[in-house]
Amino acid sequence: MSVDRIAILGAGAWGIALANAAARAGREVTLIARGVAATAIARDRESPRLPGVKLAVDITILDAAQATAGADAVLLATPAQQLRAALIPFAQSLHAGRARPLLVACAKGIECATGLFMTEVIRDVVPEAETAILSGPSFAADVARGLPTAVTLAAADNHTATTLARALGSATFRPYHSTDVRGVEIGGAAKNVLAIAAGIVKGRGLGASAAAALTTRGFAELTRFGRSCGAQPETLTGLSGLGDLILTCSSPQSRNFSLGVAIGEGRAPQQAVQTGKLAEGAFTASVLVEMASKKDIDMPISEAVAAVLEEKLSVDEAMDKLLTRPFKAEGA
């Protein structure tokens, strides 16, 4: 199997970044943008979602379902809650190049309406697809500009994972391959929720010690949930788990962290969600907590975030609830 021609569905910041990364790796790249966005990006060679970052000159920009027909792999760079709707119009044309189209989820989240992870959503729309997931500590602006970045790329088949990693890898974009698809998906989804909590701590001015404690105990939650779903320990402590958690819990570039900061500073949660940039954790929190509850997994920080976002608890009430939990042994 060779992966020389890559199509990228979604021309937001992450789509632009991945297009540049794939072009930098020497692949033939098609960026699929829709409607007015396609015209503007083709004219300006940049997206308003990532101003100041130019697309590589050899990237083709198309607005057509047939754009995926000749691709060896399609990277799905749409937001998690929009993945299904974005993929449906392309379902038929995807089969033109491969009997089993290779589709790579590049969003971090869980579909609210169904509780499905991203590769499950893909197979729900395109049952014959071979799926993979790309996730890890990466900001679109860094990847687009060619700053050093390392991520995890997982597929159930090891040969597929290694082939994709080699196809997308370059001196500055380093995909580490894995077969632990579910572990990678869990890390990406859960860390978004925990980053909102970290932002609330920052916005509330609770200090660096509280931020470190929150991140550490949050990672314990992520690990408990991941293990209950069969995730491998090395995945949870790797780039797509601990690595991504550290990045998004500490930087204002993180949309989830920034949302938490706004809430911590006193903005109403729903107002902060509606007026800010898309933060996947705001959609993932409630479904993550529901899934954990069904497995009898204790995730108090995630539960607090969900309760604050749904305005069932104020920030102060949520903090009081966390701080008055019974004392327990480290690792419990």
Image: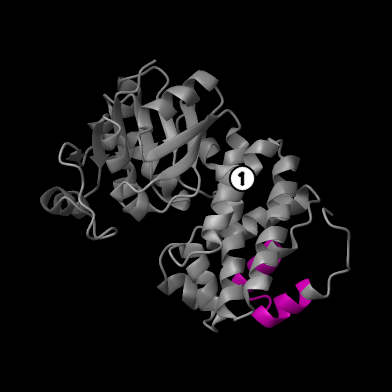
Look at the image and give the residue range highlighted in magenta.
302-322
Task: Give the residue drawn at x 28%, y 58%.
Answer: 50
Q: Is residue 23 left or right of residue 271?
A: left
Q: Residue at x 25, y 46 (%)?
A: 33
Residue furthest left in the image: 43
* Number of on-image labels: 1
Viewport quadrant of the C terminus: bottom right
Residue 330, how many percent across, how many down?
A: 84, 57
Give the residue at mark 1: 186
Secondary structure state at the residue bearing disc 1:
helix
Question: Depth check: 273 or 15 in front?
Answer: 15
Q: Does residue 60 appear to the left or right of 330 in the view shown?
A: left
Q: Against 215, is 143 above or below?
A: above
Residue 301: image x %, image y %?
A: 70, 64
The colour scheme of the drawn protein is one colour
Q: Is residue 250 magenta?
A: no
Residue at 88% across, 58% down: 329
Query: Residue lying furthest bottom in this view?
Result: 266
Q: Is residue 128 visible?
A: no
From the viewer's perspective, tell me whether residue 66 is left or right of residue 276: left
Depth check: 273 or 206 in front?
206
The answer to whether residue 273 is above or below residue 295 is: below
